[in-house]
Image: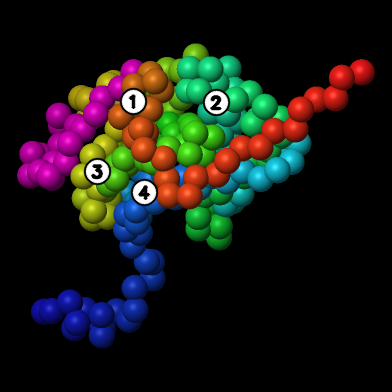
Amino acid sequence: MTPEYVLKILGPEAFDEELYQDNETAGVVTGLAWTQVGGDILFVESSVSRGKGQLTLSGQLGDVMKESAVAALSYLKSNANTFHIDHRAFAQYDLHVHVPAGAVPKDGPSAGITMLTSLASIYTQRKVKAKLAMTGEITLRGKVLPVGGIKEKILAAKRSGIKEIVLSAKNRKDIEEIEKHYLKGLKFHYVTTVDDVLKIALLKDKVKNPLTFDFIEAKSA
C-alpha cells in the first residue's frame, strides 16, 4: 500500500492542506482552528485604505467571530498610545479584515488573539514572527481566555510547518495531556494578556515597503 495507490483508489484529495506562508506582509497572521474533520490553520488578513473609519469583515464569518474582530479593534483603539498608533488612523482609514477561504463558514471565539495581532500589525506595519501560530479568545480588558480543540490544533500546526504556538496559560493543562512525541519540535508560549501576545508576535522590524499613513488635518471653524 503506497500513497500513490491510495490516491488512485480514492481519487484526488477533497481538501487542500494549508501550509505556513511567510511574514513579509503586514496584517497577515496564522491562527489555529478546530473543524469537524480535525484541526486546521487559518490566515487572518487585514488591510487599510483611505476612508472614514469603516470596518468590513469578510470570509463568511459567524457572529461570534465577527464579535472577536470588533473586540480586537476596540481594544487596539483604547490602547493606541501604548502601541504607538496615531488615533487618526482609525478615523481616516477604512479597515478590511478577511479570513480565507471565503466559501467555508467560520465561527467561534478562538481567533480573537489572531485578529488582534493582525490589526496591530497592519496599523504599525510591523512584521509578525515567522512560523508562529496562535489561538485564544480575547476580552475588552485585554485578557486571553482558553479555547477548545487544542490537540487537533497542535497536530494541524505541525503538519503546516509551524514552530511556535501562542495560547492561553489556562490551556497549559491541555498541552500536558498530549503525548510528548506529538509536541516534538514545537515551542509553546502561554499568555494571560494580549500585551503578552504582541510582545511575542510582533517584531520591531517593519515590513518591506511599509504603508505610510497620511492624515488630513481638521479645518478650524
In this rendering, the label closer to the viewer, 3 or 4 = 4
Who's the residue at 34% across and 25% down the image?
199
Which quadrant is home to the N terminus?
bottom left
Q: Disc 1 marks which amino acid?
A: Lys
For marks 3 and 4, the one nearer the N-term is 4
* Residue 127 in picture, x, y percent from top left: 39, 41
Relative depth, front residue between 29 and 31: 29
Spatial distance from mark 1 to mark 2, Cα to Cα? 16 Å
Who's the residue at 12% across and 44% down the image?
185
For marks 1 and 3, the one nearer the N-term is 3
Farthest residue, direction top: 141
Characterize the local packing of mark 2: few (<14), some (14-19) or many (20 or more) Cα atoms within 10 angstroms: some
Residue ID for mark 3: 154
Q: Disc 2 marks which amino acid?
A: Ile
Residue ID for mark 2: 85
Who's the residue at 43% across and 28% down the image?
137
Q: Is residue 3 visible?
A: yes
Q: Is residue 35 visible?
A: no
Up-down: is 2 above or below 110? below
Characterize the local packing of mark 4: few (<14), some (14-19) or many (20 or more) Cα atoms within 10 angstroms: some
Instruction: Please give the range of residues in magenta.
Output: 175-192
